[in-house]
Image (spheres, helix red, strand yellow):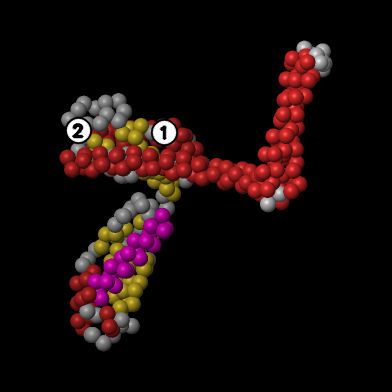
Amino acid sequence: MAGILIVFLIILGGLIAPFGDLLGTKIGKARFSILRLRPKKTATIVTIITGGFISAISIGLLLLVSEEFRQRLFVDIPFLQKTLDDSKKALLPLQEERKKLEDKIMNKEKELNALKKNVKEFRRGNVVIKRGQTLFIAEVTSNSNIKLDLGKIYNSADKYVQKIVIPNKKEIKNILFFRSSDISEIEEITAEGGDWIMLIKSAANVLRGDNFVFVYPELFKNKIVVRRGEVITSEILEKKDLDNKNINSKLKTLLGKTRDKIKFRGSIVNEITTREDFIKKIRDSVKKSQNKKYLLEVLSLKDSRTADPIIVELNISEL
């Protein structure tokens, strides 16, 4: 069917084309004019119109005879255009995501390069302060002269850090650099009243000889974390746990729970100070009887506030 249609269109075009040319020639000889145009231009326009007429007839016949052509022209092409538009819209978020990933990769590469540099400096022994390291701890009590007190703390911290970073140089004016927003926030909080503990921490690794150290403050309520004689944590030592391996494991678990508990209560200390050798005390106790269970209790030996050391002893009792 398609082949017959194509042959028919070729024959039709061949018949109409000479007719259009002949019509243009006749109009030219008759010196016929349209819209006051010169006869020659009028003949050209007639020839063009005839060509357009041929194309229109061809398309019309295709639409009339060929269902496939109608399908492609009125259904497939709009559908493909819509699909293309939808694909472009779907591609936009992917392009944005790609850009974000590229930016993230670039940032990670920068971090990696900085880390490599820091590793080299660590190996050389030139890094004297690590990022996040606590440089200075101070107690702050709210009062009418709180800004003056904070200024004294900053100056004391500055002098202390200078001795670490540039020990062989004369004291310079300032080595610590705070963000002004951090200073304002500390002043606002401490002005509200109460007792506080302020930590000054390094914002980056610092090399020996650097002339500046970027820092940031952290503020904690200065409160009682544990009281003297308080049982902080406890653990039961079963009969099956009386060998050295299990005793060590139980004790490690007990001290870990103790450390977690005081951290949860607000202590900023990282280690617990023990008054005696816990393992020896447990062994000495269980030697007396291997057929009993024991209760292990970690007791605080003093009242300890937020920044105070946590000093404990182990109490062992039979169950």
Residue at horizontal 78%, vertical 15%? 29
> Can residue 283 be seen in this snapshot?
yes
Q: Is residue 99 above or below residue 65?
A: above
Q: Is residue 310 above or below residue 52?
A: below
Q: Amino acid at mark 1?
A: Arg
| Structural distance between the alpha carbons of marks 2 and 1 | 25 Å
Q: Quadrant of residue 163?
A: top left
Which residue is tagged 1? 179
Residue at horizontal 27%, vertical 59%? 273
User: In the image, is 47 to the left or to the right of 279?
Assistant: right
- Relative to the observer, which residue lies in front, 202 or 56? 56
* Quadrant where the image shows the C terminus: bottom left
- Relative to the observer, which residue lies in front, 283 or 231? 283
Of the two numbered discs 2 and 1 in the rendering, the one whose residue sits closer to the viewer: 1
Q: How many marks?
A: 2
Q: Which residues are magenta?
A: 246-266
Q: Seen from this angle, which residue lies furthest bottom?
A: 291
**What kind of secondary structure does the magenta stretch mostly adopt?**
helix
Q: Where residue 176 sits in the image (x, y, percent)?
A: 33, 32
Which residue is tagged 2? 167
Q: Where residue 135 sits in the image (x, y, percent)?
A: 30, 41
Q: Quadrant of residue 162?
A: top left
> Can residue 190 be seen in this snapshot?
no
Is 55 inside the magenta-drawn segment?
no
Q: Amino acid at mark 2?
A: Pro
Density class for disc 1 (Cα within 10 Å; few <14, some 14-19, many ≥20) is: few
